[in-house]
Amino acid sequence: MNAFVHFTINTFTDREWGEGDEPPRLFNPTDFDADQIVGTFADAGFGGVILTCKHHDGFCLWPTETTAHSIEASPWRGGKGDMVREIADAATRHGVRFGVYVSPWDRNNALYGTPEYVTEVYRPQLRELLNNYGDIFEVWFDGANGGTGYYGGANEERRIDRQTYYHWDKTWAMVRTLAPNAVMFSDVGPGCRWIGNERGIAGDPCWATYTPRGPDGEERSAPGMSDYRQSPTGTRDGAAWIPGECDVSIRPGWFWHENENDKVRGAANLMDLYLQSVGRGANLLLNVPPDRRGCLHENDVANLHAFGEHLRATFGENLAIGATFDASDVRGEDPDRYGPARLVDADRWSAWTTDDNVRTAEVIVTLSEPRTFNMIRLREDIRLGQRVRGVSVDAWVDGTWSEVASAESVGASRIWRVGAVTTDRVRVRVTEAAACPALSDFGLYQEPLPASP
Ligand code: FUL
């Protein structure tokens, strides 16, 4: 779960997409507070934060050599400020990772549409960010590209060829060199993929592998070229490892607008999003835009806090801890190889797995006493790939097994919300797998009634 921060001149002009001709003097947050922003995310359990260092209008939130259309030309901190630095430093202080969004489209820049824009402006901008702001965990390549704009006063429409214009192979290679650990996001990856909608909802099933194809069925490798309708589920047995990332805003818009202060998603809504993204094996990238003060609005803060509390109340106690795990029904094999299974309370990186040629398996979880739960979580040891292709969970109720949950895919995590079940015995059945299943975590939880809508 990572946080997304959309902030630029748009915040002050009440727009979603700036034209590129906005005067930098409009950018003047009165009370910018990176610790308030990042601290709120850390408190709610977010592991990283991605900042729109440059959105489509071209205004750069850091002092850059590449353009005069930047924070240096704004009144904020007397033109001496560096918002990227302040967010990056706050991320370090709060123990969360820092990532950058740098729009490939630039509606301000006179060079946009020429090869020089890519070599003299866009790539150098990325280079400045990757070289000077510590470890970058993700680089976000947006798909919106080309159209009308200011373009240094030309005020015209400029179209580019998405396949060839950016020479993405060179940009990706540069990112790999400068920030080897950074995950690169776009609709075709190469690191993680846009989930195909801006509602934050992964497909079900959701495969971490993906073969991006265009609407014509041909394979595609350039951002903005894939048929996004295939992205929610990905491709079982797909060509590349490109897990899904679900970007969505806590408000109707990506940027802050005064008239959306009463339209902020509440804890229950955020929990639903969590289950439809993280709970299906993808990432949740939740946008929370600062207001004109340069802080998160009180309503956003309150709802994020309530969401964090709800997550802690739900996942704080795993009712399966202390249970015995019996995998003796992996028959015909040496039982010592499989038991006692340590699926919970174990080293996070230890996995339970069957022998190489055993692709179906059952594990019976016996609790020390009957417990009531309404949420089940299962995870694969994702380092070994996504292997499970069918799984069910049964509960022992009234002297018989009854199925309470099932899924095609698990991946990094699968969370089921189920009707309340009271039992002391649960059975996990892997019914199909591409290779011997490797499970790394099992949990039973009691989700309290969600607090607010
Ligand atoms: C879209 C952009 O056009 C929006 O403004 C926003 O940045 C969203 C995350 O991606 O493609």
Image: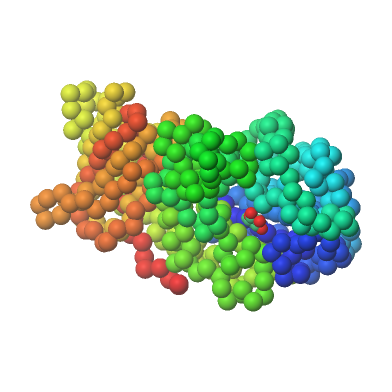
Q: Residue at x 61, y 74 (%)?
A: 261
Judged from the image, the quadrant occupied by ligand 1 is bottom right
- In the rendered view, how is the structure colored? rainbow
Q: Residue at x 37, y 34 (%)?
A: 387
Where residue 346 appears, as percent x and y from the top left, is 38, 38
Residue 308, above or below 330: below
Q: Is residue 439 left or right of residue 299?
A: left
**As rendered, which of 102 and 214 lies closer to the eye?**
214
Where residue 163 appears, as percent x and y from the top left, is 67, 38
Total of numbered circles in the picture?
A: 0
For residue 155, what is the image quadrant? bottom right
For residue 314, what is the image quadrant? bottom left
Q: Quadrant of the C terminus?
A: bottom left
**As rendered, which of 10 and 305 lies closer to the eye?**
10
Where residue 333 appears, as percent x and y from the top left, is 21, 23
Q: Is residue 25 left or right of residue 312?
A: right
Where residue 76 appears, as percent x and y from the top left, is 84, 63
Q: Residue at x 67, y 68 (%)?
A: 256
Q: Using the rendered image of the protein, determine whether residue 297 is visible from the camera's viewpoint.
A: yes
Q: Residue at x 82, y 42 (%)?
A: 114
Q: Is residue 245 left or right of residue 376?
A: right
Residue 419, above or below 185: below
